[in-house]
Amino acid sequence: MSDKNVDNREETEYEDVCYICRRPESKTGKMLHIPQNISICVDCMQRTFDQMDNMSMVPPNFDFGPAFAEIPQAGSKDEDKDSDDKDKKHKGPSIRFLNLADMGGLSDIPQSQRVKKAKHKDKVKPVFDISDIPAPHKIKEELDKYVVGQEQAKKVMSVAVYNHYKRIANPNKDGVEIEKSNMLMIGPTGCGKTYLVRTLAKLLDVPLAVTDATSLTEAGYIGDDIESVVSKLLAAADNDIEKAEHGIIFVDEIDKIAKKKNTNQRDVSGESVQQGMLKLLEGAEVEVPVGASSKNAMVPMVTIDTTNILFICGGAFPEMENVIKERLNKSSSMGFMADLKDKYDKDKNLLQKVTVEDVRNFGMIPEFIGRLPILFALESLTEDMLVRILQEPKNAIIKQYEELLALDGVKLTFTDEALHEIAKKAMEKDVGARALRAVIEEFMLDIMYETPKDDNIGEVVITKEYLTHTGGPQIKMREFLKAESGQ
């Protein structure tokens, strides 16, 4: 690459690379450019300044010893050297700066280590505009295209989001200050908690940070500190503070920070995390690092106001059914009108009866629950719901496999009996909708391996017999399909 092309940085297809730390500009941000085509990131330049400041703090009468013999400068005379020898022990080391021409610059970096610039993608217009938020029923209609079932949950989330962004547009109308609509969702694993939040943030085109409460500890003892959830939101907003302050933070596995029972040790990952999150949920100005998840002297800090950030907490809350049963079975179990202890054992949607009292008995402190005013539970998935999940959503699993085989010119079809058999096998795994992909991958492996071998295959029909290992899939050749369509 010639020097002319190197100097013209706008026309090159490769990113600038820091000469010291070798990180590309996509990781470091904007770089400083000095002569000889050398790029230095802000972090490395700051470290250089810090080292120079440390050297300037050396006492004036400090003897550096013979290791720091003064380097004679170009053009010095011998008579000057004799006069300087007397004061040499009272002087610090003379620093000779490097010749920039010896450093090489961009041409010194091998071609295999260069990073190409990312191509700018055309931004897709969002479905909704947060400045003109639509009515809740419009939001629910869009959620229906992606999420099957969970009618109550979608209705609650639509109303909460509608009220939240109306509150941002009208912060203090007629002297009435509207409080935040933070949510706490409870549901079994694989029922769609995270998927609901991701879909909602995608429709609104707002930054979303999905974090796991299991890694949070008080003041970051071992894992992440509590403010790291805000720094992740800032990173999702491309370090745009104003955009991040209107985003959504989803804290998953929130049940893992419940108050630990029967422990005498300091609970740095339980109740302490709940107490630390109180200021974030209610709204406070916090300092978070830019481009990093931990605070240190080399990372710049910015202040973010969490007053307009929507917090959604979710968790499976295992054993919550036992807490609910204990509350519902408080009446006497003796006598003619007594309630049976196993009355609610077969109720799959027992979580729908959850109350604030149950969450508090589970181990969440009252101050934490009070800052999550909207509490709702998601339904357990049934076999019919799993069949609908397979084929109805926009990005349904069946549609994904049909598209994969269509790229090879093969049509993929599932019978109704096969879909119910897939749902039945997924129900046995007891991990929710995540089991559907595992079940389909198991029997689609041979089909996707063998189909590209034969160009004459035109259609593959998945039957129940193939899933139960009592038969095979129906294979239709292209000639047969042509003849059938000609008739």
Image (cartoon, grey):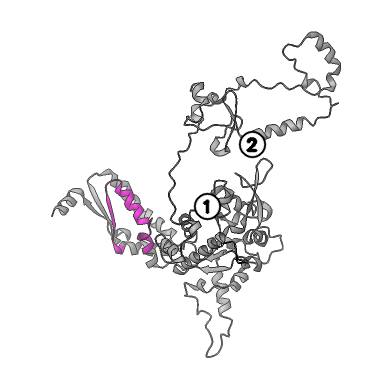
Q: Is residue 407 covered in magenta?
A: yes
The answer, for residue 230, to whether it is visible in the render is yes
The extreme front residue here reads 174
Quarter of the image holding residue 79?
top right
Residue identified by numbered label 2? 43
Image position of 441 with respect to 101: above or below: below
Q: Residues within 10 Å of mark 1 (few under 14, many from 20)?
A: many
Q: Nearer the viewer, residue 339 or 398?
A: 398
The answer, for residue 446, to whether it is visible in the render is no
> Which of marks 1 and 2 precedes in the sequence?
2
The extreme top residue here reads 78
Q: Secondary structure at mark 1?
A: loop
Image position of 229 with respect to 138: above or below: above
Tell me the kind of residue under disc 2: Asp
Q: How many marks?
A: 2
Tell me the kind of residue under disc 1: Pro
Quarter of the image holding residue 393?
bottom left
Image position of 11 with respect to 158: above or below: above
Residue under the image location 51 percent in, 33 percent down: 15
x and y, in percent, of residue 365 in the image: 65, 67
Report how far apart the C-alphas of labels 2 and 1 lie in the structure: 26 Å
Q: Which residues are magenta?
A: 388-417
Q: Which disc number belongs to residue 207?
A: 1
Q: Is residue 443 covered in magenta?
A: no
x and y, in percent, of residue 440 in the image: 37, 56
Q: Nearer the viewer, residue 91 or 387?
A: 91
Q: Residues within 10 Å of mark 2 (few under 14, many from 20)?
A: some
x and y, in percent, of residue 291 in the image: 60, 44
Q: Secondary structure at mark 2?
A: helix
Residue under the image location 81 percent in, 12 percent down: 81
Q: Nearer the viewer, residue 169 or 111?
A: 169
Q: Which disc number belongs to residue 487?
A: none
